[in-house]
Amino acid sequence: MTHNISIPAFDINNQEEATFTATESGEFEFHCANMCGSGHRDMNEIS
């Protein structure tokens, strides 16, 4: 199963390996950006 990660605050929407350094501190939403199956809607977090 392929998953993408999306972190809108940092304009990240990637299916491949990604490395980045956050430019600000705080809590940010991230979620799976690929319709991956029945649990897709539950694949989100704020961290």
Image (cartoon, rainbow, N blue to C red):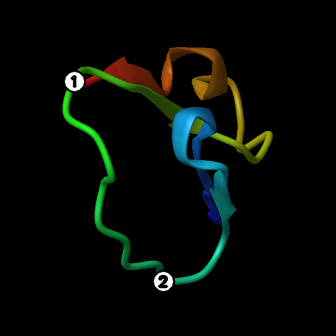
The structure residue drawn at horizontal position 71% and vertical position 43%, both measured from the top left corner, is 33
Q: Residue 17: which disc?
A: 2
Which sits in the foreground, 43 or 7? Answer: 7
Q: How dense is the environment of label 2, judged by Cα within 10 Å: few (below 14), some, or many (20 and up)?
A: few
Q: Label 1's element? A: loop
Q: How far across and down, in percent of the image, does residue 23 sit? A: 33, 52
Q: Residue 26: which disc?
A: 1
Q: How far across and down, in percent of the image, does residue 18 sit? A: 46, 78
User: Considering only vertical position in the picture, is 33 above or below 18?
Assistant: above
Q: Judge left or right: residue 44 versus residue 35.
A: left
Q: Judge left or right: residue 41 versus residue 28.
A: right
Q: Judge left or right: residue 20 versus residue 36.
A: left
Q: Residue 39: which disc?
A: none
On-image quarter of the N terminus = bottom right
Q: Amino acid at mark 1?
A: Gly
Q: Amino acid at mark 2?
A: Glu
